[in-house]
Amino acid sequence: MNLFDKFTTFIADKEPLLAIKPEIFGTPIEKMYSPTEASIGGRRILLAGTNNYLGLTFAPECLAAAHQAIDEEGTGTTGSRMANGNYTGHRELEREFAEFYGCKHAVVFSTGYQANLGTISGLAGAADVLLIDAHCHASIYDGCRLSGAEIIRFRHNDTTDLEKRLRRLGDRTGSTLVIVEGIYSMLGDQAPLSAMVEVKKSYGAYMLIDEAHSLGVLGKTGQGLVEAAGVTNNVDFITGTFSKSLGSIGGYCVSNHRELDIMRYLSRPYIFTASPSPSNIASARAALRLLKDGEHLRKRLWENANRLYSCMQEQGYRLGPQVGPVISAQLETTEQALALWTALIERGIYVNLIFPPAAPHDKPLVRCSLSAAHTPEQIEYLCSTFTDLASLARPLSQ
Ligand code: PMP
């Protein structure tokens, strides 16, 4: 056995996919024109596979705040929050997140990935249990692994299976953290949160929800599923990212448990990495203000999502069970998914192509994520193109 054997196998398996132009993975973007348009392969392309849900990446308020922070504080902090990277902006943003959720404590991390890694591995240890939804994101799985705790998966969005597994844990439920997501990143469906909160409460367990895809998207003020379900104060820890609705980079966790603050001294992904740059923090702060008052943006986003979802459903695409800004079409085979993705890019549309194991049910996905910044004309173009290409997504037996 050689160190590089696994690469040989990987390359043999993926070579045909890696040779396709423009590249499917890490598609080179030559120029950004707006939140919804870019130059790819020398052509103007409509972006329908970003996480820019509120379209704030070019908001004048966010640009101005980022420019000012660069001018006044420089390009980077060059240190971790525990050392020289704890600026006023980082602390103010924590205060603003705590206020936004009506929680006592908030911690800002360098990415959303690290928010999950740092919170989960900071909270749980070898004697604890992590009960996680089977569709949870890689950052949650990695946080669980780093913690050394026992990891048990329950069936996706299945409250009965969650209850069964809690019951089996007997007197260990008090050291159990249940982990779910607001909107799941692959199929765009939402956790049945109220029912799950009732179950975890009845067993004396704790709960963490990752609102990465639901911050700014759900709830009157955009808190996420916790607000839409009316359970903000009944979930123990809420994590999320700045890299989607806030159009920046960074992550957060909020809680009423004081232990979240103490975790700063224990959580390796918080301690051993540089803090977000001043401009990332400044634009995230400006975006959080726009997000709170962004009911008009949420309205536009949901109009867009409803329109594309119903159009694709009518055309026979196999979609996730719930409408939302993440709209995924499930295909039978790699070839079928590739044919649809390629036909879309030829018609000037970029979406995400996702293969198992990242895609659930062992089936590839062509995933759209929509934005409040998509115009009605852009949405109509998406609808007419998916209509034209519907035959490419038919089950092979038909
Ligand atoms: N959680 C979920 C559910 C995600 O989908 C992602 C990013 N795709 C993250 C966390 C990580 O966020 P970030 O990009 O800020 O690292």
Image (cartoon, rainbow, N blue to C red):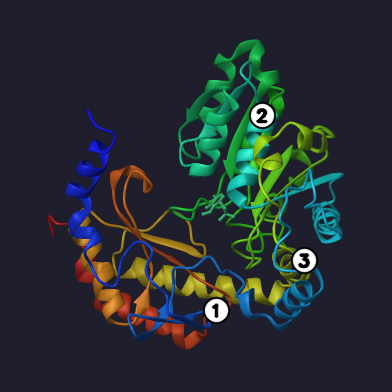
Return the residue nearer the eye: 195 or 215: 215
Position of residue 120 measured from the top left corner of the image (x, y, whole percent): 64, 34
- Mark 2 and mark 3 in contact? Answer it, CB < 8 Å: no
Tag 3 secondary structure: helix
Alpha-carbon span between mark 2 and mark 3: 33 Å
Tag 2 secondary structure: helix
Position of residue 45 measured from the top left corner of the image (x, y, whole percent): 39, 82
Q: Which residue is mark 3?
A: 285
Residue 24 relative to residue 126: left or right: left
Query: What's the residue at 73%, 78% (across, down)?
Result: 67
Quadrant the N terminus occupies: top left
Say whether residue 208 is visible: no
Residue 220 relative to residue 397: left or right: right
Quadrant the C terminus occupies: bottom left
User: How many numbered circles does the render carry?
Assistant: 3
Q: Which residue is mark 1?
A: 35
Q: Please, what is the three-letter code of the amino acid marked with disc 1?
A: Pro
Return the residue nearer the eye: 125 or 165: 125
Say whether residue 285 is visible: yes
Q: Which residue is mark 2?
A: 200
Query: What's the residue at 61%, 18% (across, down)?
Result: 126
Return the residue nearer the eye: 332 or 73: 73
Disc 2 vs disc 1: which is toward the camera? 1
Callout 2: few (<14), some (14-19), or many (20+) C-alpha neighbours within 10 Å?
Answer: many
Find out if the beta carbon at label 1 lies less than 8 Å from the nearest ligand 1 atom.
no
Position of residue 367 measured from the top left corner of the image (x, y, whole percent): 39, 62
Give the mark nearer the N terminus: 2 vs 1.
1
